[in-house]
Amino acid sequence: MVLKAGLVTFYHLHHYGAVLQAAATLRALASLGWQGEIVDYFVNQDTRILQPPATPRQAAKDAYNALRYPALRRRWQRFEDFSKAHLNLTARRYESREELEAAELPYDLLISGSDQIWNPALFPDGRFDPVFFGAFSPLRKIAYAPSFGAARLPGGMEEELKGYLAGFSHLSVREPSGRETIQRACGREAEVVLDPTLLPEAAEWSALAAERVVQGGYILCYCIAFSEALEPYIRRLAEETGLPVVQLCGARRKLHPKAKMIFDAGPAEFLSLFQNASYVCTNSFHGTVFSVQFQRPFFTAVAPAELREPERSRTFSLLSRLGLADRVVGKGDAAALGDVPAWPAVKERLEAARAASMAYLRAALADEPLEAEVSRPREEGPLLADRTLCTGCSACAAVCPRDAVALVRDKEGFAFPQVDLEKCVRCGLCSKTCPVFQEREPKPVPAVFAAWNREADVRRDSTSGGAFSALADYVLEGGGVVFGAALDAKQRLRHTACFRKEDLWRLRGTKYVQSGLEGVFREVKKCLETRQVLFSGTPCQVDGLYRYLGSRPENLTTCDLVCRGVPSPGVWEDMARRIERKRGRELQTVRFRNKVEGWKNGHFTAVYDDGTVDTHPLYETEYGRAFERALFLRPCCHRCPYACLNRVGDFTLGDLWGLQPGEMPEQQQKGVSLLLVNTPHASHMFDQLPLIRQPFPVERAIAGNPQLASPVPLPAERAAFFAAYALEPFDQVVRRFCAPPPLPERMKGKALSWRQRRG
């Protein structure tokens, strides 16, 4: 007797992924001796090409579709034909839970999955649809690869989810974030399994594909929304290979000016287009899946939220599992244009993942416990922080007793640790020292002050109120040494030691670029053996120093900065070379925020080797405009754990933004420092500093400096910037991304204060 399973899933949408995943699930069931049938549950999704124009957007869509109606009609029919041939549906369509409850369904169990059937945002009321949890039947239930579509559920829905999951004997999800959601809701463990479209092998999909849609080689573009990050890849591939560009239409805007647009492809034609492509550029998850299935060289783009938190991304989850994470564009470790995936290794990983997913499905169908998967040996090498969390603090390199860890720049121009496995002795010190893997103890809310230096010359040469110089002078006068960031002759920013007041000018002033720390922590440690040390840097650099030292020495004073994020050293150095090319002379020094027109209107001032000077308002320069938009910050800056009042340094320094008009008028012109006193050590030193100070409300400090409460958001165009930066001449990248904004935006900007424009 053949056992029968009822499948509740998305299938009726004329969407390639929905139809193909439903067909794949049925085929997987059949391979295990089960007869699968899709419960034909209608959830108010209209597949008509032209729909009643309820909104202006729908009216525009209908107008667009009307111009292409013959092709779209062929597409519609091809979806219907494919579904009839490959989707086994119930004889009756059910339009409500009540109809299903009244029906006599001939199943041995119910299966929920795959697709985003557990995403409440997809349903009209923003709530779960109980049908997709099998709530209409007392039958045993299992789940195969459903998705919640988001990392977290809306407030108050976890208890509801707990009730729906109570009837499931076996749970699995498509993404790790789904496993975390289930764990939070009901404390149960869920397996992370492959999307059903990865269960059949490529040959099975080839058998379902249509005849060749396009003759000869071609670059296939399939984007469900326009992707600026893929544009340079498509353009360069077309230029270097001479192949035509074929765009399977999801996004309506052309991704290449000469792209051949295909509007009439059904699921079989979709398979054919991927099977025969020479290259694929996509931002679709299932576009990525079938690039892998048919072993087509591909590049994929993901949403900004996925770049910020790749551990919550289904695309990253899949590609990391297969060793293909470098095919995601707009990242520092993205593959080069001509790099071909190591398909034999990918196939081996895919086969292992497929076997594990089928083992789960087999056990779930039989109502048996899943045997523990035999863990594969981990790759050699120590555990390092994920690229989106690594701050580049250099603690791992500094602590390594064999110098096996080196900081190497990636394609975004940021330094990341790389391990020489021949030198590495697997002592684990780098992992134990890394701040990313350590918890920070909470501290009391710091004392907050407005402060400025008594010496007018020092204050004038400082970015804000000159509080750092007062700290540095105090340490130097006691025979100590100050470590801070300084530009060298090639405009490269590095931390350096300062032993004399006369050299302190090099450390003053804000530098909008990440500083290098190679060898600095070891030098600090050596200096601490004989003298007082002041170390000034970003919070992550200060934390890295403490982790490297393993303690808080009494003769060490630290000052962390209110940090809006650190820009790429590689981008800055390319910009410096561009400035030199444009002026035909070398830069001698740069002031990122010079007070030639007062504190609030900071100027970018360039001094050249012949003595000439250029100065312009920072946010009217190419570099300043891009920095204002946070285009090229280090990835970790957008999820910074130090953007809070639990500060790591003894002191915290920044600009006192947020002063009201008329409040401290003289100080607003000359510059005021925001100074946070975070530790008893700092409090003792603060009382001895020659600073004018006033207590300041912490709430207003946060309002003026939002990075005391939260990280700077990741801009949508960051991936596009770095995709272009990886492939195109820098001057071309600057013209595209750093040009003045359109006139309406410029006029709006003039009506806002400098601080409001910065956000």
Image (spheres, grey):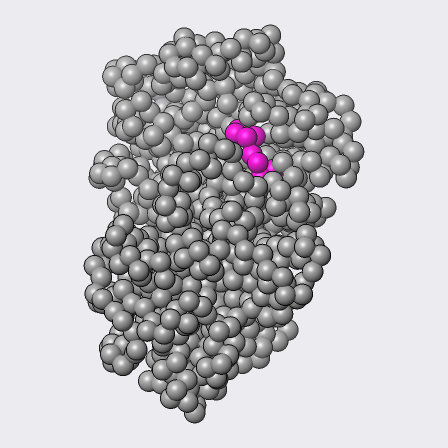
Q: Vertical placement of 187 versus 522: above or below? A: above
Foreground pick, 2 / 618 = 618
Q: Is residue 646 visible?
A: no
Give residue 97's position: percent from left, percent from top.
27, 19
The residue segment tinted magenta is 223-230
Question: Which image quadrant for residue 534?
Answer: bottom left
Taking the view exactly as shown, the residue that stands out farthest to the bottom is: 530
With 740 as the anchor, is 92 left or right in this view? left
Number of numbered discs overlaid on the protein picture:
0
Q: Is residue 225 magenta?
A: yes
Residue 24 screen position, x and y as percent: 52, 29
Residue 366: which quarter of the image? top left
Residue 585 lies left or right of residue 737; in this view the side is right
**What's the residue at 60%, 29% (across, down)?**
222
Q: Is residue 456 visible?
A: yes
Residue 105 to residue 420: above or below: above
Q: Which residue is drawn at 49% across and 55% down?
A: 603
Q: Which of 385 and 171 is in front in this view?
A: 385
Residue shown at 30%/39% (left/top)? 153
**Among the 4 quarters of the image, the one containing residue 665:** bottom left
Residue 186 at x, y = what percent? 26, 45
**Quadrant occupied by the N terminus:** top left
Q: Which of 598 and 239 is in front in this view?
A: 598
The location of residue 730, given as percent across then percent down, is 66, 49
The answer to whether residue 309 is magenta is no
Dominant secondary structure (helix, strand or loop) of the stretch shown in magenta: loop
Q: Is residue 251 above or below residue 664?
A: above
User: Residue at 21% of width from left, 65% of height from top?
Assistant: 695
Q: In this view, does 392 lie to the left or right of 475?
A: right
